[in-house]
Image (tube, rainbow, N blue to C red):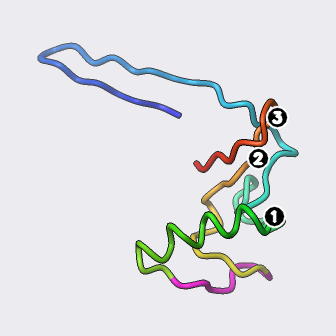
Amino acid sequence: MVCCVGWVVLTISFYTEMPVGLHTIVYGSNDAGRTVHNDNTDFEKKIEEVAKQLNLKKHPVAGQELYTSALTEGHLGLVRVTPYIS
């Protein structure tokens, strides 16, 4: 995650490391759409809640049904089972 803060002539960028890796992805794609995941029903339910508020419908993406684009990545963390979306 990145946060950029600009003030007058100074810009500061903050970076945080998330406890995710190549094998923590459960939703979307981390390889430019070659492989698309929708592997965790609990995670999909959380995405569905947000999608309803944004009026997004489920649609086919490379053999999977997603509410977002394939480039949206959903991970379950390594340290705690915390959902991360990027």
Q: In the shown orientation, is residue 8 left or right of residue 17? A: left
Determine the image quadrant of residue 3: top left
Q: Is residue 50 above or below residue 22?
A: below
Where disc 2 sits, the SS reads strand
Image location (x, y in percent) of residue 20 = 76, 36
Q: Do the residues labelled 1 and 2 touch (CB within 8 Å)?
A: yes
Residue 65 horizontal side relative to residue 57, left or right: right
Do tag 1 and tag 3 residues touch (Cβ < 8 Å)? no
Q: Which residue is drawn at 64% across and 45% down?
A: 84
25 vs 4, left or right, is right
The percent coordinates of residue 67 (x first, y second) are 59, 75
Residue at point 57%, 70% (across, down): 68
Q: How crowded is mark 2: few (under 14 residues within 10 Å), some or many (20 or more)?
A: many
Instruction: Name the residue that disc number 2 marks.
Output: 76
Other residues around mark 3 within 10 Å, as few (<14) / some (14–19) / many (≥20):
few
Outermost top residue:
10
Q: Looking at the rendered structure, which numbered label has been put on residue 78? A: 3
Magenta-colored stretch includes residue 59: yes
Disc on the earlier residue, 1 or 3:
1
Count the marks: how many?
Answer: 3
Residue lying at the far right in this picture: please name it.
23
Check whether the beta carbons of the residues at disc 3 and disc 2 lie within 8 A of each other. no
Q: What residue type is labelled 1?
A: Asn
Q: On the image, which quarter does residue 18 sit in?
A: top right
Q: In which quarter of the image is residue 37?
A: bottom right
SS for callout 1: loop
The magenta stretch spans which residues? 57-63
Q: In terms of depth relative to the viewer, which is nearer, 45 or 71?
A: 45
Q: What element carries label 3?
A: loop
Q: Does 36 sit above or below residue 64? A: above
Residue to which mark 1 is pinned: 40
Q: Which amino acid does label 2 sit on?
A: Leu
